Image: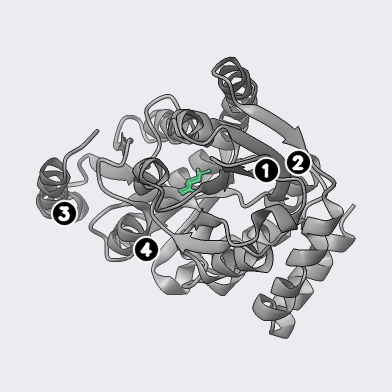
Amino acid sequence: MFTPLRRRALLAGASFAMPALIGFKASAQAINLRSADIHPDGYPTVEGVKAMARLAKERSSGRINIQVFHSRQLGEEKDTLEQTRFGVIDMNRTNFAPLNNLVPETVVPGLPFLFRDEAHMHKVMDGQIGQEILAGAEKHGLIGLCCYDSGARSMYNKQRPINTPADMKGMKIRVQQSDLWLAMMRALGANATPLPTGEIYSALQTGVIEGAENNYPTYQSQRHFEVAKFYSVTEHSMSPEILVMSKRSYDRLPKDMQEILRESARDSVPEMRKAWAARSDSAKEQVIAAGTQINTVDKAPFESAMAPVYDQFVRDARLKGIVQRIRESA
Ligand code: BDP
């Protein structure tokens, strides 16, 4: 992939990109925006932002030009999010998880067994509650543009099929860099190890970790199936993806351009979802063909083992209210 040197060179380029954006105000010229994604080209999140880019270009008569830096070219999610907050990177598509410690509202959609199914998740995230959660990012320097799909996450490991939480006792499981995610895996008895996505493959190979958890498309595209053959369908979280824009970059733009960006992001969601549905199926077929052993589980013991994280992370009345509204929504 990209060497640290190449990554540094790309990041260094960012500071030179800034004057172009600042220059825009005076000269009303092109608006060049750089968007980060850890996934490879062709992955549904990358395709989603490309769809947004097409719409924004069209609607701004060619003035808005969004370039997607996929495949971790700009770095891992935690780092690129910091840079997005400070306007070094203009846009970023990440999971909700790396925002959890910064933006309290973002823990909600990742909570275990919260959404009943995909339709429930879509309804919540497309509606008023989704808007409230996205808006939570604003006081931390990020404009929440839209949510993308990430399916459901399940456990996978090198050792054995997981059927009950007891099978995970002491197992070294990688988690996303978030206190919520640490607590969720600890609640299942695992020895949770936070790592950025790009380090999972070699950590699995060397035995630093024995397993991780994710949806089929990431398990397949990051090639984790090559080293961790047991995939157990726990579907413990539906933590969606989020597309954010740097508030610094956003505030430099005129109102009409800001509106175009918001609407283009929103209108890219159906295209992303189409790509997501196709990729979920094909990724599953590919890992099965490559020898992955899939087992389904009784989810009830996983759900009750993980339930205490609600008390730990949903403390104030506002977050409690959001969770309750999600549970009550049809
Ligand atoms: C994938 C998300 C990606 C996360 C990754 C992970 O699309 O944003 O970084 O999981 O677990 O499903 O690190």
- Choose between 204 and 2: the one closer to the eye: 204
The disc label shown at residue 152, or none = 1
Which residue, given by chain and number where applicable, does mark 4 sit on?
247
Residue at 70% across, 45% down? 162
Which residue, given by chain and number where applicable, does mark 2 sit on?
118
Residue at 53% across, 48% down? 212
Q: What element carries label 4?
A: helix
The CA distance from mark 4 to mark 1 is 30 Å
Marks 3,4: beta carbons within 8 A: no
Residue 140 in the image: above or below residue 92: below
Tell me if I can see residue 38 in this picture. Answer: yes
Whichever of labels 3 and 1 marks the residue nearer the N terminus, that label is 3
The disc label shown at residue 42, or none = none
Residue at 42% across, 44% down? 204
Tell me if I can see residue 255 in this picture. Answer: no
Instruction: Give coordinates of residue 31: x percent, y percent.
Output: 26, 43
Q: In this view, does 240 lie to the left or right of 224?
A: right
